[in-house]
Amino acid sequence: MTDTQTVDLRAAARELHDAGLCVLPIKANGSKKPAVAWLDYKVERTTPEQHDSWFGGDRPRGIAVVYGQVSGGVELIEFEGLAIREGLLDEATEIMDAAGPEIAEAWHAILNGWVTESPSGGRHYRVRVEGGDVPGNKKLASRLAREDEYTEADRQQLRERPNARIVRVLVETRGEGGYGLVEPSGGTVHATGRPYVRLEGGPDTIPVVDVGTMAAIRDHCRMLDQLPQPETPRTAPRPAPPRQDGTLRPGDDFEARADWADILRGVFRPMTTRGSETYWGWADGVGGVKATTGRDEHDRLFVFATGSEFQAEVPYSKFGAYALLQHGGDHKAAARELARQGYGSRHLAAVGARSSTAAPAPAPSEEPPEAEQEDTESAANTEDESNPEGFDYADAFGLPATVRTPYDYRVTGRGVEVLSASGENWNRVTYTPLVVTATFEDPEGDQYVELSWIDRSLGRPRRISRIVSRETAKRGRKLIETLGSAGLPCVEGDARSVEKWLAEFEASNVHRIPSEQLARWLGWQDDGTFVSSPEDGIKVDTAFEEQRGPARAHARKGTLEGWQDTIARLADFPVPRVAIAAALAAPLLKPLGLNSFTLDISSRSTKGKTTALQVALSAWADPSEHASAMSNWRTTLYAIEKRLNLVRGIVTVFDETMAVTDDSLIDEVLYQLPMNHGKARSGGAFGNMLPWETILLSSGERPALSFTTSQGAAARILGTTIAPFGDGGGPVAAAVREGVLAHHGHAGPEFIQFILSGLAQPNGREALKARHRALVDEFRGGGDMTNRRAPMVAALVLAETLACGRGLLPYEPLSYDVWRSLFTAHNPTDNRPDMALDVVREYVAGHAHELYSATRAAMGDRPPFSGWLGVLSSKDGVTEVALLPERVRKILAEAGYSLDAVVGSWIDADYLKVLKSQRPPHLVPRRFDGARAKCLAFTPEGMPYGDQDEAA
């Protein structure tokens, strides 16, 4: 991108910002993805200062607008290039013009507002929605791809899943939480290399449309959808087998000769026709287009409104529509009446069917005998016949009493059965009742369904429920594979029948099955809400079975006041107070833009390390040992990643570092934690790079830093070796532990509500960041380590200060001097080279007999079984210890240190002698036991030895 283009992007950003829009930079690699982390910008508009930094210099970039509330309620309507080439924009305009003056006027205002041509030849139209919220991104119209349009990726998908539908989107929107590229983005920003071009208007000419009219415009655009819709026997009965004599049934005859205008009279009126497709509006003339017919060769009725007897966006045959309007959906009664009117080869004798209006019919002919009556009827059964035992969905599954069994199915205590094609037999689908009991949508817009069934494996009936993605529910084999271990009452051979049954059941009860919001983790959600507990009223269904227990442990018990009375006893104990501050600081990481980090409490004593962690955890969850919120280091790396993945802004606790079975596990976790995601696993496997956002509380006899070889780890860990309850605090620790076991789960949710209310204020996020920056400056010091730790310390101090000011914590905040003494002053756990050298000194002190010396040579001592450790020599009254580097490397490795990581610091501290003529200079030649070897020769400061030669 040239300098001129860069200037253009700056000017474009200024124009967009002045129009009240939120601006984003876009990567110039053809991916169309933001060049920055942009989650915060869904709710907080970017600033001109950020625009200057993003679009300055010579970095190639594209530019985009975030739609929705952050940009003043602006929404994008996009007609893809494919839709433009196939004339759908003209078709949409005809539909809008036929819908009445209000919709037509709004539509033409949109067409003449701010219009952009995309590199693929599409059109982008913007509208500012007034009087209501902008919905999320919506796909309004699509069609199946033709074979000549398949890409290599499409063909690969078909090879893997031969029945997959390859879809091309024609019309879609970008709304709340979405973004779209704008001009003058070009060059490598789009995969084609072509630019976005402004065709008309600009950000200052976006038309304003009220929320009701905009909803109607979206509905009218949905009429362009060309995807085949599944037909149900209730709305479009399947063709029955032909009669042996070749004559027509009344329903088939009616389907062939009836006219939609006669069937829909009094409900809809024709508004306009385009080709074979007719658009219909309400019969009273109110509103715009509400339905279409003649879309394809099947000539089905599609209704897009919800104010009629018809289900929205479900295809109806002529016979299905007639049966619904004239006979309340009773197909048998409809077939009898049509036969009485003369449809079919012969008409039936009147059998008590009520008179009703239908399309003109031919003259009646000879009546067949009563025995032939069944042959003229639809294959439909009434609800009572399809469910002879009167299955009670409300009693079994808690569903509304209005839930009904789909046509051609029946549900009994024995399971679900479907009527055979011949209409003579019932075929088993499942072995116990299986239904959809709820539908969910998460903040990202992904959909899920809750499946429930009756299980009798334990000898008594019980209800089992599991939540799966809608994609899984639509793929029978995958569904059975996913839920087979949970007891799903079907086998792989039933896969197609099960997926079809679930689709039919949901379609028949779409407005009756409860629909809820779903969270897949605890803490911050993608829409800016915060879920503290499964008790918050939002369904929590975790991605992994192992996360269910810890999620349930985030529950409330006792009272907030009881918890406050308990922790009031901690006023004189800084370490457990710091742990509480860390628990409350976890939700601040996101608004402050901080990465996850660790607070480590270690000491050799048994003075309440676990209790301190339990007190902190009690702000959010049950801290008892039997609850699953309290974790232990004796586990696997993958299990730890899953546990961390449960939370985005809630504290995580791992107790007792000494219980770890492999020291490298703690090293890996401390390294990975600040990255906010787990390890990358080959092939993008399930569990690949699991995300999290947390403060990890750890305890143990050994400092967590002693398990890591990473020299940068100290800057990501706040550690203290002070006993949490000192020498005389045992009774307090016991009382506090009992108190938090009885009262927990209140403080964290109360604190986050306070934070959310603050963030909702004008410039609330900036005010919070400003307080944090001031504290960071307060805790900066003279050393690099102190400066790197300052943001973490400041987050803890800020959390405690806010909670104390709110009255949530019943004591005064710790003084800054206490915080400095804990974390910003020199801490022996910071200096890993010295800690490593201490390990070597201790080993040498205990293995002095393995050091070769002149005294040992004179005495004729043989080498020890493990070989010489090194050589002890004396010159001018100064004793020198020189050790073989491979023995030192092994000693350090067993203690969790790396020689290569610390040797440079030993040289800088003059702990090792160097000889510049050597390569490397710190390996100095020494002779002992008749041999010459390169050794690590320690100075007296590095390895003071005294008179231990004589003692040896």
Image (tube, grey):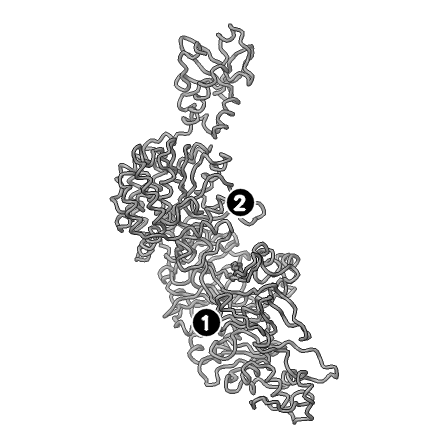
Left/right placement of residue 460 relative to residue 240 reads: left
> Is residue 120 at least partly visible in the picture?
yes
Q: Nearer the viewer, mark 1 or mark 2?
A: 2
Please state which amino acid type lies under the numbered disc 1.
Answer: Leu
Q: Residue furthest right?
A: 245
**Residue where numbered disc 1 is placed:** 111
**Residue 543 at what x, y percent from top left?**
50, 53
**Residue where numbered disc 2 is placed:** 680
Quadrant location of residue 736?
Answer: top left
Tell me if mark 2 has few (under 14), some (14-19) or many (20+) residues whose alpha carbon lies within 10 angstroms of its own.
few
653 and 418: which one is in front? 418
Disc 2 is placed on an element classified as: loop
**Residue 90 at what x, y percent from top left?**
52, 74
Asked whether the beta carbons under mark 1 and mark 2 sit within 8 Å of each other, the answer is no
Tell me if mark 1 has few (under 14), some (14-19) or many (20+) residues whose alpha carbon lies within 10 angstroms of its own.
some
Q: Residue furthest front?
A: 459
**Residue 473 at what x, y percent from top left?**
56, 61
139 and 405: which one is in front? 405
Earlier-in-chain disc, 1 versus 2: 1
248 and 562: which one is in front? 562
